[in-house]
Amino acid sequence: MFYRDLPDLGFNEIMGYCNPFDFTDESTNKLQFGLLEPVKGSDTPLDIGKIVLGEKLASPYCLIGRGTSVIKANIDGYKLVITFSWQAKTRKNEDKFILDARTLLDIIEHIPEIFWKAMVKDMTPVAMLRDACVTKGEIFKVREFRALVMREYFPIYILGPKDFWSVIVKIARCLHTLFVRLKMLHGDISISNIAFYKNDKNEIVAVLLDFDLASYFPFKQSSNHRTGTALFMAREVLNLNDKDFTRALHHDLESLFYVVVWHGVGYKGYKIPKKGDILADWRKGSWEKILGAKRSFIIEPSTMMEVLDYIEDKEFRTHCQGIGTCFHDASAEVTAQQKLANIKWRKLSFQEKLEAADVTTQVAAITAPPVTYAEWMKGADEDPSCTCYQPPGDTQ
């Protein structure tokens, strides 16, 4: 297939992306606003008829997965972004999670402000290709095209160490509040899904973006279906060999730790630092290779220190070391449990092994130990107290 064939497959020139319908008026470059419906919950009055598209921020080419594309827009100078993506039909719309989260007034400033949404049937040849793939297995899900218009926010990687860390702490508290109050889990913590803006007092406000993969606890995750950004995935999410598991807050917190380390050693967004691709094994190769690299980072003190030594800001490095120690200590404790279980297993007779299914299940289930919110915050030398009500047992 040649580049000239792309328009026939639904690739839009402005978006550089598979496009199920013509989003723009050729003469004005305005969005065809009639397809969008307003979302309740925004306090900012805007006229959708005046929306104008701007530059493309992200545009993947894919037939599998969400394939999220992001474009800048504005209405009379008010800056917006529009996200376009193919979402699994079985998933709740992102706006439902966002509006639910915005009911929590103590964290509403950390949840994106959204204005309009759309669901449109994909009529392009790409849709036919996707439909053909659906029968090939679970990875090719039945999807529908969705668009969401929201306020524009700024990437956190442009911030200095002190402000960056302040945003991270606020996001940790936000994740905890969402879980305790709503049983909501984000499910895709990454460097690109955390942003900021400045309020009227010129203060930096953290914002948690992209609720596409959000879920409500308890949410059982299939071991053969990973969701999230591989670079920042928790070890248990990456581990294909483990049994099905239930997503919980500790998975998001582990991902948040990887975001801190990634930025701390010098990556700006996804741009490789001049000192080298230090964490190449976190982003390249098979799932098993990425999992092995993260396990080594957590379990081997020398590996962790070798990575963290690249962090130039001393205070930032101290925060990372504290959190890293929490993960290492939890893993060391579980490793000891596994060794004991394995010793006991070897001493069992063949018949006893057949009857001891619970033992083997336990061995597999403790390969990725949780670090609680309180432990995460204490390791970071931050106050773990939270304004939200915290019932017993809800700190995971």
Image (spheres, rainbow, N blue to C red):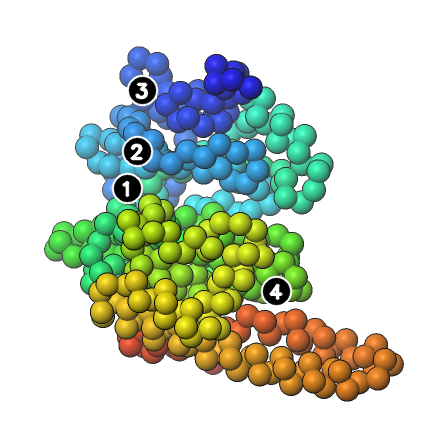
Give the answer, above or below, for where 168 lies relative to 188.
Answer: below
Q: Is residue 335 left or right of residue 323?
A: right
Mark 4 or mark 1, whichever is nearer to me: 4
Name the residue at 77% across, 86% down.
347
Taking 359 as reference, is 9 left or right? left
For marks 3 and 4 on the same chain, the one whose residue lies earlier in the sequence: 3
Residue type, label 4: Phe
The kind of residue on which mark 3 rests is Asn
Q: Which residue is mark 1?
A: 152
Tell which of 238 and 166 is nearer to you: 238
The residue lying at 12 percent from left, 55 percent from top is: 201
Q: Is residue 78 left or right of residue 105?
A: left
Q: Are marks 1 and 2 in contact (CB under 8 Å)?
A: yes
Q: Which mark is residue 29?
A: 3
Residue 362 lies in quadrant = bottom right
Q: Position of residue 119 (x, y in %)?
A: 49, 33
Secondary element type, mark 4: strand
Q: Along the polypeptide, which appears first: circle 4 or circle 1?
A: 1
Alpha carbon distance from label 2 to label 4: 38 Å
Determine contact: label 1, label 3, CB under 8 Å. Answer: no
x, y percent for residue 74: 25, 32
The residue tagged with tag 1: helix, strand or loop? loop
Name the residue beneath numbered marker 4: 245
Q: Of residues 18 and 271, which is closer to you in this image?
A: 271
Residue type indicated by callout 1: Glu
**Mark 2 or 3 closer to N-term?**
3
Mark pair 2, 3: CA separation = 12 Å
User: Of the numbered discs in the image, which one, if any, rests on residue 72?
Assistant: 2
Report the quarter where the N terminus lies.
Answer: top right
